[in-house]
Amino acid sequence: MLEVDRIESAYGRARALHGITLSVGRGEAVALIGANGAGKSTILRAISGLNPVLSGSIRFEGREIANQSPRRIVHAGVAHCPEERKIWPDLSVLDHLELGAIASGGLRGERDLDEVFTLFPVLKECKRQNVGTMSGGQQQMVAIARALMARPKLLMLDEPSLGLAPKVIDEVLAAIRRVHEAGTAILLVEQNATLALAVASRVYVIENGLVTRDGSATTLRDDPAIRAAYLGF
C-alpha cells in the first residue's frame, strides 16, 4: 500500500530525514518509535505533503505522491491526524466532522457519520458540543474521527497519547484498535513505546532521521536494548 523509499527531507537548511525507507501493507498497523526530535513527525509530514521531499520516492497504491499537495494526498486515501490535535475550540463535534469530509472533496452522508459514531459512541452523545469544552481524550477522538470522515485507506496518527492521563490513553488506544479492526491501515508515531507496541504488528525505530531497527512488535518488545531505551525496564 505505502512504500517510502530512501526519502530525505528538511526544515529550511536543516536536514531532518536522511534516507528513510519503510512500508505499510494494506490493513496493517505499523508504528514509528524514537526519542523526541528523531524525525518521526517529519516522516508523516513528508508523506502527507506538508514537508518537502528532497530525494527518494513515496508511493501509495502504486502511485507516486511525493511533493503532491496535501489535498491530493487526502483524495488518494491518506489522512493525517496531527500532533496536538489541531482542533478549533469554538466549533462543535459536527463542525469538525464536516470539515474532515470537505477536506476529502465534499460533504459525506449520514452513513459516514453513523460509522464514525459507531467507532466513537461518546461523540454521538455530544455531537453539538463545542470541542473546547471537552476533555483531552474526547478532543483526540474528535481529531481521529475528523480524519476518518475522509474515508482514508491509511490513517496516520501523530502522538495521539500526548498530554493525556493514563486512563484516557487506554480509551484512545481502544479507539485506535477499533479503527484498525474496521479495516483501516494505521501508521502511528508515538513516544509512548508501550502504546505503540500494543497497537502495531511491525515497528520501526527512528534515530537522528534514520531507521536504525525494524521488526515485529513481539521481537522488539523482547529486545533488551529496546526495553532499556524505550520501555523503561
Image (spheres, helix red, strand yellow):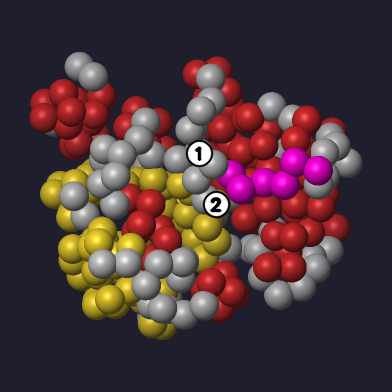
Residue placed at 76% from the left, 73% from the top? 106
Residue placed at 58% from the left, 27% from the top? 171
Which type of secondary structure does the marked residue at label 2 adopt? strand
Q: Nearer the viewer, residue 44 or 117?
A: 44
- Which residue in the rendered view is the most extreme toward the bottom? 63
Which type of secondary structure does the marked residue at label 1 adopt? loop
Stretch in magenta: 85-90
Residue placed at 52% from the left, 66% from the top? 78
Decide: is 116 above or below 104: above
Q: Are marks 1 and 2 in contact (CB under 8 Å)?
A: yes
Residue highlighted by disc 1: 160
- Which residue in the rendered view is the most extreme toward the left? 225
Q: Nearer the viewer, residue 197 or 165?
A: 165
Residue 174, image quadrant: top right
Q: Main secondary structure of the magenta part?
A: loop
Residue 122, image quadrant: top right
Amino acid carrying label 2: it is Cys
Residue highlighted by disc 2: 81
Give the Cα separation between the discs numbered 1 and 2: 8 Å
> Is residue 197 toward the left or the right of residue 92 in the image?
left
Q: Is residue 202 visible?
A: no
Residue 125, image quadrant: top right
> Is residue 1 toward the left or the right of residue 174 in the image?
left
Q: Residues within 10 Å of mark 1 (few under 14, many from 20)?
A: many
Q: Nearer the viewer, residue 105 or 163?
A: 163
Whether 87 is among the magenta residues is yes
The quarter of the picture where the C terminus appears is top left
Decide: is 106 above or below 219: below
Residue 202 image point, x, y percent: 29, 47
Q: Residues within 10 Å of mark 2 (few under 14, many from 20)?
A: many
Residue 96 image point, x, y percent: 75, 52
Decide: is 221 above or below 51: above
